[in-house]
Amino acid sequence: MLSVLRNRTYRHLFTAQAVALVGTGLATVALSLLAYRIAGDDASAVLGTALAIKMVAYVAVAPVAGALAGRLPRRTLMVAMDLTRACVALALPFVDRVWQVYVLILLLQAASAAFTPTFQATIPDVLPAERDYTDALSMSRLAYDLESLFSPALAALLLSAVSYDWLFAGTAVGFLASAALVVSAVLPKPAPVERTGGGHARAALGARLFRATPRLRALLALDLAVAAAGAIVFVDTVNVVRDHFHRPAGAVSLALGAYGVGSMLTALLLPRVLARVGDRAVMLPAAFALPAVLAAVTAISAAPAGTGTWVALLAAWALVGAGSSAVLTPGGRLIRRSAADADLPAAFAAQFSLSHACWLLTYPLAGWLAAGAGLPVTAVVLGGVALAAATGAAALWPARDPEELEHLHTDLAAGHPHLADAHATAGGAWRHDHHYVIDRHHHTWPRPAGRPHATVG
């Protein structure tokens, strides 16, 4: 898996992602403690609202960023967003009102919503081989796990010497280092974007891809299952650690680190597993495991606090991390299979936006339910959401999901370049098969084999 780091461009981009995420991880811990300082027992509700604002920024900005990514230099866009995030991080230590936290989180995450899909769409151009790209997805997952593992450990170390306000300075350093690494990378020229329909049409393209492609609809349901389980970890950890288990601030980092351990170990194993079995065989069982873990969290959080239940909570958080990683890591492979090269920025932007719409639902639920009804009730409700989402994904994703599909064209004239390998049918349509994605020649998904094929234009 580490062999992809021999590619200089990818090495610089991966390192940029890693250092930015370490900084983001420091900010996650610091933001939890900031919310606790400002709101006390209501910290979960404040943090849940702040993270919901983050999701609003992601949902609103990412599709626009996906449309711009094919028109603006990617390096310029990513560096500008890194600099914006660094400035916001430096301002966070000076807030003393809840509304100020909300405004700065909105600015910070709007910049992230523009940066991340652009970064994701660049990697397939840097590593076009399927095996290399799979390894890069696992490496990317590992980078995200640094936010949940190394960053909390670093935060705990720093908190022993300085106040949490200084963690925001570490966040700014991470974003500045990321900007410098992106500047130093030689990015390949992206696939040309067909200039039709304007920016609004490009922004809507990604949503159309997800609506029309069965495996992408399933991916969105899987994202909801992950969001239901992950929201409890990211929103409620600070209160359950401080108020239920009565442990110090450093234990918040330990609990978040347990999530990172589970996620990282899974990401390390996935390239070998995915080389032997398909994405569906990995992602669906992992999604069904998440509601089972949340059922265990219900029992753990309802039991009296003690060493045994504390260890059980850490184990549950690790299992949530493992299941989430097994669902999220192969997601990029599904998107790459389901979009033309020129449409990848729009597809990744849509996935970024739609998946974070799931978190927009689960973050407030995790925060407000925990503050009003307690963690056991929260785990029951979000466990039900995760189970429903996993069941929906299994129904939406066909068990047989080949890349090449036979289909008909009814409105392309004879001699059209796309029909070079097609043959005419008795009804005057043209039939052929190839790697099938939704694009300007294919507007709907063919019916399953053995049933009449839908016509496409």
Image (cartoon, rainbow, N blue to C red):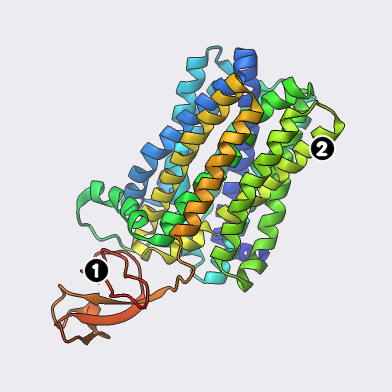
- How busy is the neighbourhood of tag 2: few (under 14 within 10 Å), some, or many (20 plus)? few
**Residue 369 in the image, given as x and y percentages of width and height:** 56, 25
Residue that label 2 marks: 311
Q: Hey, which residue is sitting farthest right in the picture?
A: 307
Q: On screen, 265 above or below 229?
A: below
* Mark 1 or 2, nearer chain start: 2
Residue that label 1 marks: 441
The part of the image, by quadrant, that contains residue 95 is top right
- SS class of the residue under badge 1? loop
Q: Nearer the viewer, mark 1 or mark 2?
A: 2
> Visible in this render: residue 84?
no
Q: Is residue 160 left or right of residue 18?
A: right
Q: Is residue 103 left or right of residue 155?
A: left
Callout 2 amino acid: Val
Q: On screen, 287 above or below 441?
A: above
The part of the image, by quadrant, that contains residue 274 is bottom right
Q: Give the distance between the C-alpha atoms of the residues marked 1 and 2, in whole angstroms.
A: 55 Å
Callout 1 amino acid: His
Residue depicted at x 56% and y 46%: 387
